[in-house]
Image (cartoon, helix red, strand yellow):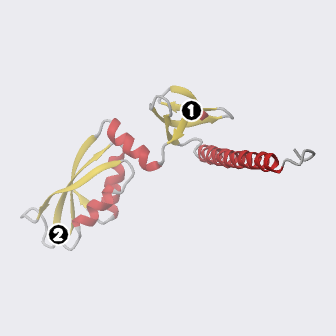
């Protein structure tokens, strides 16, 4: 082209090369982004060793929840009860804490409890209920009844709360919170 002094062919060849260079740069950018996302997931998994995680299989959509036991370059091992499952890292995505709680709420059986607690009359039942709702493992909580009857000392109120949990041992956390607020469980 240069020896033939074919300027049009030279410009077209250079334009074509530049277009491919743009495609290459875009591909490299996408590759860097994918590597960065994978590195971030690996770092999250490393920090989660020994903790409960939720992993969604990207092809089947099945969610696996368990204690992260082992992490290698290609595989992750979860333990649930006495069963272990080994999954290929490239085939799973990590559920964030909100997604994991939502999945558990929709898929695990729930246990309902009622508790009556005596508090000073000036206590705010809505704040107490909201505090219970904020505990990990509590699915829902509501005020069922407020009672000022003859069985309750003057200046006090009995608040009955209903709540649902995924794990029955969360009941202890709820009761500790209520007692920590100065409540006396009836």
**Pointer 2 local density, CA inside 10 Å: few below 14, some 14–19, many at least 20:** some
Image location (x, y in percent) of residue 114: 21, 49
- Relative to residue 183, is residue 140 depicted above or below? above
- For residue 91, the mark is 1
User: Is 148 situated left or right of 184 in this image?
Assistant: left
From the viewer's side, name the closer residue of 165 and 118: 165
Residue found 39% across the figure and 51% down from its top:
136
User: Is 146 situated left or right of 138 in this image?
Assistant: left
From the viewer's side, name the closer residue of 28 and 167: 28
From the viewer's side, name the closer residue of 170 and 10: 10
Asked whether residue 71 appears in the rendered view, the answer is: yes
User: Is 156 situated left or right of 83 in this image?
Assistant: left
Image location (x, y in percent) of residue 178: 30, 59
Disc 2 marks which residue?
Answer: 156
- Relative to residue 32, is residue 108 depicted above or below? above
Asked whether residue 167 appears in the rendered view, the answer is: no
Image location (x, y in percent) of residue 155: 15, 73
Image location (x, y in percent) of residue 102: 37, 45
């Amino acid at each position: 082209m240069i020896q033939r002094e074919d300027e049009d062919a030279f410009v077209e060849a250079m334009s074509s090369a530049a277009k491919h260079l743009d495609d290459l740069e875009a591909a490299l950018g996408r590759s860097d982004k994918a590597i960065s996302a994978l590195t971030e997931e690996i770092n999250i998994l490393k920090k989660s060793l020994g903790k409960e995680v939720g992993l969604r299989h990207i092809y089947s959509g099945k969610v696996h929840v368990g204690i992260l036991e082992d992490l290698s370059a290609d595989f992750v091992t979860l333990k649930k009860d006495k069963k272990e499952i080994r999954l290929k890292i490239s085939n799973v995505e990590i559920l964030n804490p909100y997604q994991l709680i939502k999945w558990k709420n929709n898929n695990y059986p729930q246990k309902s409890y009622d508790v009556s607690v005596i508090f000073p009359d000036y206590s705010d039942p809505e704040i107490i209920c909201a505090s219970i709702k904020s505990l990990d493992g509590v699915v829902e909580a509501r005020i069922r009844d407020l009672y000022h009857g003859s069985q309750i000392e003057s200046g006090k109120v009995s608040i009955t709360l209903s709540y649902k949990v995924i794990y029955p041992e969360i009941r202890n956390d709820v009761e500790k919170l209520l007692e920590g607020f100065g409540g006396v469980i009836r």
